[in-house]
Image (spheres, rainbow, N blue to C red):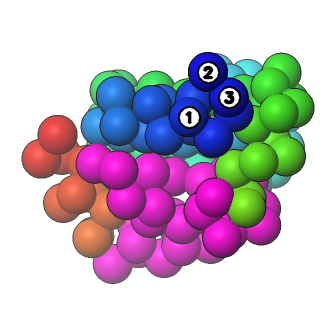
Amino acid sequence: MNTLEEIKEQIKNNSILLYMKGNLNYPRCGFSDQASKIILKYTKKCKYIDVLKHSNIRRELPKFSNWPTFPQLWVHGKLIGGCSIIIKMSETGELKKILEKI
């Protein structure tokens, strides 16, 4: 399986997927830290992929998603966005509504 197929499978097979630096309990960058803390407030069903351990995904995902940075939150196969969007959606209550349905 090539990297693009692997990314598509990960997104397809996980209702909530966060591509991040580090893991949910030990983020390795400030943006991933903020994003994971917000997501974990609403759900524990989040799967993550540590892009620091998977350089092929770190290199290819931005091309596929047309989103250049990490973290990237995907819900039901759709890119929600990065840290600033996660924060904004949390502040408006929209993220809570989306994640609590899953």
Give amino acid for label 3: Asn
The numbered mark at residue 5 is 1
The numbered mark at residue 75 is none
In the image, the segment drawn in magenta is 64-92
Q: Report x, y in % for residue 58.
A: 80, 42
- Front residue of 9/20: it is 9
Q: Report x, y in % for residue 54.
A: 80, 25
Q: Report x, y in % for residue 17.
A: 46, 38
Q: Answer yes or no: is residue 53 visible.
A: yes
Instruction: Find disc 3 in the rendering and name its residue.
Output: 2
Q: Is residue 77 magenta?
A: yes
Give amino acid for label 2: Met
Please, which residue is most extreme toward the front here?
A: 1
57 horizontally vs 77: left or right: right
Question: Residue at left 83%, top 21%?
Answer: 53
Give amino acid for label 1: Glu
